[in-house]
Image (cartoon, grey):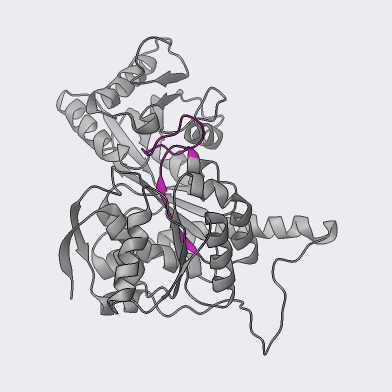
Amino acid sequence: MRSIKALTGNQAVAYGVKLCRVEVIPNYPITPQTIIIEQLADFINDGDLDADFIPADSEHSAMSIAIGASATGVRTFTATASHGLALMHEMLYVPPQVRLPIVLANVNRSLGAGSGIWVEYNDSMAERDSGWMQVYVEDNQEVLDMLLQCYRIAEDPRAVLPIMICLDGFILSHTVERVEIPGQEEVDNFLPKFKPLNFLDPKNPKSMNIAVSPAHSMEMRYQLDRLMENSRQVIKDVDKEFAKAFGRSYGGLIDTYRMKDAEIGLITIGTATSTGRVAVDELRAEGKKVGLIKLRFMRPFPHDELREATKGLKALGVFDRSISANRYGPVFTEVRNSLYGGGMPIIDHIAGIGGRDLTVAALREMFAVLEKRASGHKTKDCYWHGLRGQM
């Protein structure tokens, strides 16, 4: 039976993990994800979740344990943030190549010297080429729903890849929202028991993650690239099946808002999308033909979907909540690569770094720049919004 609860994003992750009947949960705590694991520990202690909780001595160890558990053929979950994800870096490259469908929740926060505990995407963006699928969510309902979808996507025989669900630190992780929780029977029908593609079995000995000679390594990387390509259709199919089962659709790789007749578009990611919708509505009320594209997956990147969604636009903006220290943000460089040769002006908009407030006024600023460019006026290729003082 379905129920309605007021949940933080972290609690929504935990409820999703419980509904997915995860069997092994290794973890090392780090703000702002620790509440996920505390909630899961409560579920296990109260008998609501039959799972092995394994405290690790570091995030590197947590991912190592997850790899070992998944390799034995059990559904596995872990969570981290920021420096914890960075400490996992070495081990993150193992599950994709070995085809282990681990699900990882990363609660985004800043990384490195001058770091804080507030949201930006430099932690997860740095891992986008590790072979993990990556989805960025907008609200707490999507957090829970994507946990259910992530296991269906990751375990699909057409892909069998790990997936990272990324949610904004504090904006989602610690903020309470209304969330509909599906019934366990509904979820069991949507997400059947995990049937591993390959697993370690003493009765049928095999090796995993062995050293590979140059005679085979390139082919392995090619196969991984093809699997990521296959996952595009898996993501679309699972979203449609989820909509039939639960009545909510997220559009697959991207979602659009008021783009049908738009002349100017802005690509957003994460919680910025909700703020962007308000800005679009205000500008539409003023007679401006603007629209929004919600980028959901960084991997696989929605090249074809973006080309289709941006047809006919006079200018396109890209919101980045991270930097590459190379003039532009990572989302912008991916988008520009996808749309290369189309002739449409594309402008990068960097904002919200380190948890800086991202307001409707800032989003309207972005649209104002795009409107100027669409009218033929000269603009820069990259703008920073919300800086204190002129840099």
Q: Position of residue 267 (x, y in %)?
A: 38, 35
Is the residue 46 above or below the residue 136 in the image?
below
For image coordinates 49% across by 56% down, the residue present is 232
Quadrant position of residue 142? bottom left
Please determine whether, in this image, residue 91 is positioned above or below residue 151. Answer: above
Q: Position of residue 14 (x, y in %)?
A: 32, 63
Residue at (60% x, 66% y) in the render: 99
Q: Identify which residue is drawn at 43% across, 10% down.
A: 378
* Left or right relative to 42: residue 4: left
Judged by its main secondary structure, the magenta piece is loop
Q: Quadrant of the N terminus?
A: bottom left
For residue 8, side relative to residue 194 (left or right): left
What is the number of callouts on the image?
A: 0
Residue 319 placement (x, y as % from top left): 39, 31
Q: Is residue 55 magenta?
A: no
Which of 17/146 is in front? 17
Which is nearer the eye, 33 or 265?
Answer: 33
**Residue span colored magenta:** 102-122
Question: Where is residue 165 shown, x and y percent of the image?
Answer: 42, 54
The C terminus is located in which quarter?
Answer: top left
Q: Is residue 48 above or below residue 263?
A: below
Residue 159 visible in image: no
Residue at the front extreme?
57
Res 20 → quadrant: bottom left
Q: Residue at x 15, y 27 (%)?
A: 285
